[in-house]
Image (spheres, rainbow, N blue to C red):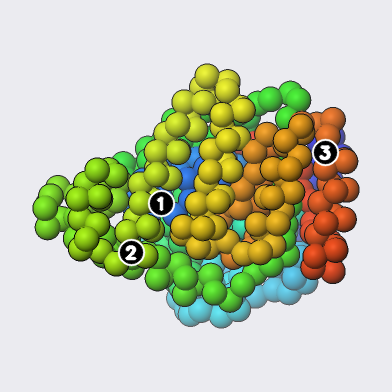
Amino acid sequence: MFSKLVAMLSLTQLLSQSFQSKFNRDPFIFLAPGRINLIGEHTDYNMGFVMPAAVDKYMVFAIAPNENDRCNIYSHDFHEGATFSLLDLNPGEMWVNYLMGVLEGFIRKGLPVKGVDCIFGGDIPTGAGLSSSAALCCGFAFALNTIFNFHLSRLDLAMIAQYAEHEFAGVNCGLMDQYASLFGKKDSAILFDCKSLTHEYLPFHFNDIEVLLIDTKVKHSLASSAYNERRASCEEGVRVLQQSNPNIQSLRDADLKSLEQVKSLLKKDTFVKCRFVIQEIDRAHRGAQYLVANDLKSFGRIMYETHWALSKEYKVSCPESDLLVTVASESADVVIGARQMGGGFGGCIINLVKKEGVEDFSTKIKKKYMAAYKKEPDFYSIHLSDGVHQIATI
C-alpha cells in the first residue's frame, strides 16, 4: 500500500512538472479511480442492483483553463498529444473521442466551457476490466466542473461521462462504471440502484483479507456481439412478461414465479438468461446483507454462485476464467470467494484471499495457468478508495 502511494505521488509530481514545463504555469491536479464490481453482473441494463467500488488505481490529470477556445491535451502514457477547437468536436483518435465527448456534454447543457491545457496519465491497466475509460471521462468532467465553477452534481457528471462513452465515442456502457468512479468511498462498496440512480454504502474493510485481481490477459472479440444478444434476450423476456403483467418494465420488476408462468412462451435460452438476471439481482441484495452482517464467508459463496451462473447459464465466461476460479475454489483454506468480473469473455478474476496465503496462491495460479495456456496472468492487489477528487498541487 505504501509503495503504491509513493508511485502515485511520483506520477502526480511528474505530470505537474511536465505541465509547468509545457504550459509555463501551475496546474490543478485531479485523481479519478478505476472500479471493480463485487457482485451483480448484467443487471445494470435490466434496471437492477450492482455492487461496484472505486479502487486505488487512478487516472491523474494536470489541467488549467487557457482562456481561449482551443484544447491542448497530452497523454503521458501514449506519448502523444492532440489540439482541437471547441467549435470542431469531431471524433478523432480513440482517447481523444472520450474527452471531446465530455466537452460536448457540457456544451449540450448550455454551459460556457472554455479551452484547457491538460496532461493526463495513470496506472489503471487497460483491457483488464477496471474501467480506465470511465475514469478518464469522469476525471476530465470533474476537473472541468471544478475549474469553471459549474456546480454540477456528481450524478450530473456521471451522466455526462456516460454520454461521452456511449453516445459520442460509440462504446456500449451503462452508468455503473461512471457512478462508481465518482461516488466511491474508501473501505466501502456501493449498492447502486440502476433504476432510481441512488445508492447506499456498505462496509468493506477486512484487515486479514486481500482483494486480488488476476488478469487473464484474454479479450475475446465475442464480447460486443454477445452483449447485444443477451440484452436482446432480456428485452424479449420483458415483452412476454408484460403480456400478463403490464407493470413489468424490466427484469428488475419480475420474480422467478412470474417468469416460470411464461416459460412455455419463451425460448429455452431466453428463459435461462432471464432467470440468471433475476437471481443475480437477488444475489446483489443478499451480498449487501452479508456485508452489513460482516459475513464474508457467505459473501464469498455467492461470488462463486455468480461465476458459475455466468459461465453455464449466461454463457459469458471463457476457459481461462473458469480455470482461475476452479483453482481458487480448490484453495478454500485461503480463498474466500472468486468470480469473473465484468461483461465477460476474459478480463479479471476478482478474488478475496487471506493475506497470509496470497503469495502461495499466486504461485499456484501462475504454475497452473502457465501449464494450460503458456503464459502468466497479471496480478493486482487493490484497496477500495474514494471517488474522483482534487488534490493539492505537488
Q: Is residue 79 above or below residue 362?
A: below
Which dot, 2 or 1, sits closer to the camera?
2
* Residue at (76, 40) in percent of width and height: 331
* Residue at (54, 26) in percent of width and height: 291
Of residues 112 and 260, the one nearer the viewer is 260
- Amino acid at dot 3: Val
Numbered circle sitting on residue 358? 3
Which dot, 3 or 1, sits closer to the camera?
1
Give the quarter of the image for residue 353: top right
Q: Is residue 393 visible?
A: no
Q: Is residue 314 visible?
A: yes
Give the quarter of the image for residue 122: bottom right
Where residue 386 appears, as percent x and y from the top left, is 61, 36
Of residues 168 and 44, the one nearer the viewer is 44
First in sequence, mark 2 or 1: give its number.
2
Residue lying farthest front? 264
Q: Residues within 10 Å of mark 3 (few under 14, many from 20)?
A: some
Q: Residues within 10 Å of mark 1 (few under 14, many from 20)?
A: many
- Amino acid at dot 2: Lys
Numbered circle sitting on residue 268? 2
Q: CA distance from mark 2 to mark 1?
A: 12 Å
First in sequence, mark 3 or 2: give its number.
2
* Residue at (38, 58) in percent of width and height: 273
Q: CA distance from mark 3 to mark 1?
A: 31 Å
- Amino acid at dot 1: Phe
Q: CA distance from mark 3 to mark 2?
A: 41 Å
Where residue 298 appears, as percent x and y from the top left, is 56, 29
Q: Residues within 10 Å of mark 2 (few under 14, many from 20)?
A: few
Q: Which residue is mark 1?
A: 276
